[in-house]
Image (tube, rainbow, N blue to C red):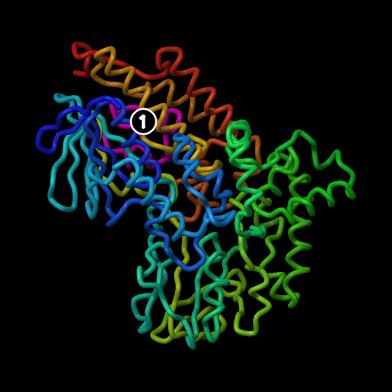
Amino acid sequence: MAEQAPKTDNHYDVIVVGAGFAGMYMLHKLRGLGMSVKVLEAGTGAGGTWYWNRYPGARVDIESMEYGYSFDKELEREWRWSERFATQPELLRYVNHVAEKFDLLRDMQFETRVETAVYDEDGQGWTVQTDTDEEFSARFCIMATGCLSTPKNIDILGIEDFKGPVYKTFDWPREGVDFHGQKVGIIGTGSSAIQTIPEIAKQAAHLTVFQRTPNYSIPARNAPISAEMQADWDANRDTYRAQARSEGFAAITESNENLALETSPEDREREYERRWKFGGLRLVAAYADLLTDEDAKKTAADFVARKIRETVTDPKTAGILTPTPDMYPIGAKRICIDTGYYETFNRDNVSIVSLRDAPIDKVTENGLNTTNEEYGFDALVLATGFDAMTGTLNRMNICGVNGAKLKDKWADGARAYLGLMVAGFPNLFVVTGPGSPSVFTNMIMAIEQHVEWIADCISHVNERQISTIEAAEAAEEEWVSHVAEVASATVLQRADSWYMGANVPGKTRVFMPYIGGFPAYAEKCNEVAANGYEGFELRGAAEARA
C-alpha cells in the first residue's frame, strides 16, 4: 500500500461522508493511493444500512455470499456466512470484521453529522461543517450516504398525541423491544414491514397491520448454508462473481432471453413454480419481457396472486394483500423477499386494515382512527419508508460554484452524469447516485464498481496535476435524457414508487435509477474513462473556473 499523505489540522485530501459499505471501501481504496482521508459518520459505528436498521426480522434480500465484498480474496475465504440471506446482526458483525481487518476505524469519526458542504472556488476544494461545530476541508468530497438512508417525514395527524411508545423501523431501539402481551399497530407494508410483521406477530397479543398499497413478496426460502453449498461457492467463486456481473441486477438471477408470451402456459407455470420454490429474486428474471410488456407481467402477477390465495386462508384478507393491475404492474416496485409473511395472516392474533378503503383519520391518545373505525393499541410501529436516492443529499446544505445549492438544482428532479458527478459541483463525487443502477442491483456490486471508478479517476487527476474535475452540463443533460428514455421503455413508471419519489409529498416525480442494466452501465463508465473522462471537464490550476 502507498504511504499515506500527511494531513494538516482538519485538512485532508478527501472527505468521505458515510461509513457504510461504500464509505468503508472508499477509504480502503484511497488509502492505497497514499491519500489522507477522513470519514464522517452520524452513527456511533460503521455499517450504514446495517447499523441503522435493527428492527426485528431485518435481513438482506441478496444471497449472502453474493452480497459480501469481492475486492479481497482473503476476506472472501476467511468469512463464512451462516444463512442464505443474512440477518442484520450477522451483517453488522461482517462490517466490524472488515473494519478491523483493514484498520478502518482510525480514519473514521463517528457521531458527526455533516450539515453543510461548500465548494471553495479559490481553494478549489470543499469545506465541510458538522453538527459538532467542527470544520473540515479537502480537495475532494465523496458522498457515500446511501440510497435509503433518510426516512420520509412522518406527517400522520395526531401522532404526537399517542401516549404509548412509537417505534420506527429505521431507528429501532438498540436494546430491542418486547411486545409480549401487547396490542400493537403497524403502519406500512413495504420491505421493512414485510420483514418485521412476522416477528412482532410471534410476540404480540394482537397485531393490526395498516396497509395502503400491497406489495408483491416472494419467499426467501432462507436456510443455513450447507457444507456442500459452501464448498461449491469456494470452488467456483470467480465464475459466480463473473456471472453476477454479467446479469442486469449484478446478482445471479438466472436471467434468460426467453419471452413469457412465447412460452406455453404449462411451461411458463412450471418455470414460475421452480423459481418460487427456489426463493429470492429469481422469479423477476424468469423471462426477458417481464420488464417491458404488460401482458407478460400479468402472467407473473397472476402466478403470485394465486400463491397468495393458496397461502392465506381468509379470502378477504388474501384480497387485501394482493396487488391488482390497476395499482401497478408487478416489478414496478421492488419485489420484497420474506420469511413467512403471508402465512402470518393466518394467525388468530393478526388482522389487516386496508387504508385504500378507509384511510387514517388521526392517531389518538390510545390508538388510531380510520374514517370508519377506532383501534386501540399499547404500542405503535411506523414502517413508512424513505426519501430515497436524493433525500440525504437534499437535507445537507451542499453548495457548488457561485453558491448554487444542490437541492435547488434537483428541485425538478435529480440530475447527475452517470450518477457520479453533478455539473456545477467540481471535485464532488456521489457513490451510487441518481442516474446509476444502484437500487436495481446487488448494492455491494454497484458500490464496488463506483468506488473503483472514482479511485481511478482521482488517481488520473492527480497524476496529471489537474485541479478540478466536473461533469459537463451537456453530458449531464444527455445522460439524464438517456436514463429517462430507457425507463420509458419499461412499465416501471406506472407505479407510485419511491423509485419515482412518489412516496414523498411534494417531491418531483422522476424515475431516478438507471434501468439499463449493470453490464451496460459499467461498460459506459469504462468507455468514458478510456476516452480521457469524456463528458467531464478537467482543468489545470491555470484553467480553474474564475
Amino acid type, callout 1:
Val
Q: Is residue 429 above or below residue 42?
A: above
Quarter of the image containing the N terminus? top left
Location of residue 36 in the rendering, given as x and y in whole percent from the top left corner: 21, 32
Location of residue 206 in the rendering, given as x and y in whole percent from the top left corner: 55, 84
Magenta stretch containing residue 425, yes or no? Answer: yes
Residue 395 visible in the picture: yes
Location of residue 272 in the rendering, given as x and y in whole percent from the top left corner: 78, 51
Q: Who's the residue at 50% across and 41% down the image?
A: 77
Q: Choose between 251 and 216: the one closer to the eye.
A: 251
| Residue carrying label 1 | 422
Q: Who's the residue at 24% across and 37% down the image?
A: 15
Seen as rendered, the residue at the extreme left is: 9
| Boundaries of the magenta span | 401-429
- Which element is circle 1 on? loop
Location of residue 136 in the rendering, given as x and y in whole percent from the top left corner: 16, 39
Q: Image check: 335 left or right of 116?
A: right
Q: In this view, does 383 lie above or below 448?
A: below
Q: In this view, does 55 lie above or below 335?
A: below
Q: Image check: 448 left or right of 44?
A: right
Decide whether the magenta segment is chiefly helix, strand or loop. loop
